[in-house]
Amino acid sequence: MAELKIDGRLIAKLEPRIGGGKEYHTFVIKTDGSYPDDIAMETSIGDVIEKLQGVNIGDVVTCSFNLRSKEYNGKWYTNVNCYKLFVGK
């Protein structure tokens, strides 16, 4: 699979949550362009969490990510999992 990347401005950092023995950090970016979107991403990777803590709301970030989907009771849920975070363009 090709590496998936997206640029955007950080607009929110949510409270961390614990699940399955891991700490997950969720953050939201807003993309640029004719049709900007808000995209919620999560990470449980230590160095990404460290970088995320140093990023301010409004900073431009580039995220490398994986998409994962799971079926539960006949419905499908998709997670956007950030595994690399770059600050600035």
Image (spheres, rainbow, N blue to C red):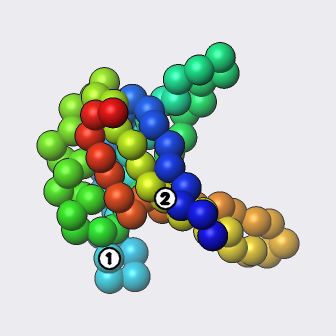
- From the top left corner, tell me how far across and down residue 10 is, in percent: 36, 33
Would you name the residue on which mark 2 appears?
Answer: 65
Would you name the residue on which mark 1 appears?
Answer: 22
- From the top left corner, tell me how far across and down residue 88 is, in percent: 28, 34
Which residue corresponds to the image point at 39% horizontal and 63% vertical from the top-left?
83
Q: On screen, 1 above or below 38?
A: below
Q: On screen, 44 above or below 4?
A: below
The mark that comes first in sequence, 1 or 2, is 1
Give SS at disc 2. strand
Answer yes or no: is residue 80 visible: no
For the residue marked with disc 2, what is the amino acid?
Phe
Q: Residue furthest front?
A: 2
Q: How many marks?
A: 2
Which residue corresponds to the image point at 44% horizontal and 55% vertical from the top-left?
64
For the residue marked with disc 1, what is the amino acid?
Lys
Answer yes or no: is residue 43 visible: yes
Which residue corresponds to the image point at 50% horizontal and 49% vertical from the top-left?
5
Whether residues under marks 1 and 2 lie with C-beta atoms below 8 angstroms apart, the answer is no
